[in-house]
Amino acid sequence: MIVLLTDFGIIDPYVGIMKGVIKQIHPACEIIDLTHQIPAQSIQTGHFILENSYHHFPKNTVFCAVIDPGVGSKRKAIGIQTKNYYFIGPDNGIFSFLSHSQSIKSIIQLNNSNFYYKKNPDHTFHGRDIFAAIAAYLDKGFIFDKIGTKISNFKQIATEKIQLINENEMKVPLIHIDHFGNLIFSINYEDFHSFIKNNPFVISFKNTIFYKLNQNYVSDKKLIALFNSYGLLEIAMPQGNAKETTKTQKMKNEFIIIKKMEKNEK
């Protein structure tokens, strides 16, 4: 199985062409579209989507991720083999979430042109000429380490970190805004509850204060806070758009404050 993730959209033929290349090499291949609606050149968004999606797929799935603003430049084309999966794409940080994984078995630079679709790839469409072809060969059963040259590392991108203000207060960055306008922050359920330790809490974002978490999106309140299907803290607007309501235009420098209170404070 090959899973495709790109920023190509669905109007132009680029995704269809990649599938055509895959099917030429491996006609029996099953292809799944994770999404092709990543904002153009947004490596950070592609990183987030892939990190929170890949583990839902069967073992030996090949993930072909092509968000590649540096196509045709000196950036490497790489493959990463983990215990259960393969990842193929540009070395631009989109696979950063694997950097702390204990399951990485091998990293290669995809420089064996025998496995390319075109021996001399175009400078503007490596998704077709390199990544789709190599994903097809891998899914067909070719040995990973034969497809390129082993390397020791891959590029990392900076990700926003949770900041501990003091022992009772933390600052949590906004890391994703989804199609519905839901605002997703970089703290998961386990870390949140480890921090508050069954104490009352306050979550503040711009001019809105939350004293409790919802279990789902059904509410008569204008804005709610809950843990979503990624397991991350989210601010949502039932039957509406939290991004528009809070006038959140971009993710950079947007955050929530979580404050743990003593039980007698509330």
Image (spheres, helix red, strand yellow):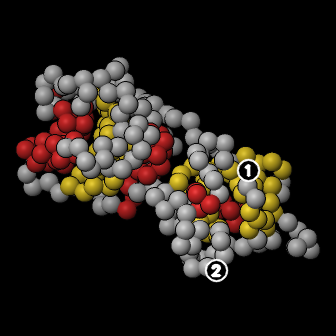
At 63% across and 75% down in the image, what residue appears? Answer: 214
Q: Which mark is residue 253?
A: none
The answer to whether residue 83 is left or right of residue 18 is right
At 36% across and 38% down in the image, what residue appears? Answer: 67
Indicate the amino acid at tag 2: Asp
* Residue 70 visible in this rendered orientation of the protein: yes
How far across and how far down the image is residue 153, in percent? Answer: 43, 30
Task: State which quarter of the image contains the N terminus.
Answer: bottom left
The 10 Å Cα crowd at callout 2, few under 14, some 14 to 19, many 20 or more, is few
Q: CA distance from mark 1 to mark 2?
A: 27 Å
Q: Which mark is residue 171?
A: 1
Task: State which quarter of the image contains the C terminus.
Answer: bottom right
Task: Give the mark nearest the N terminus, 1 or 2.
Answer: 1
How far across and how far down the image is residue 219, in percent? Answer: 61, 79
How far across and how far down the image is residue 49, in percent? Answer: 43, 52
Q: Which mark is residue 220?
A: 2
Q: Secondary structure at mark 2?
A: loop
At 57% across and 79% down in the image, what residue appears? Answer: 218
The answer to whether residue 224 is left or right of residue 17 is right
Q: Secondary structure at mark 1?
A: strand
Indicate the amino acid at tag 1: Lys
Task: Report the front residue among 194 and 221.
Answer: 221
Query: Compared with residue 23, is residue 146 higher up or lower down, i.e. above or below?
Result: above
* Residue 94 visible in this rendered orientation of the protein: no
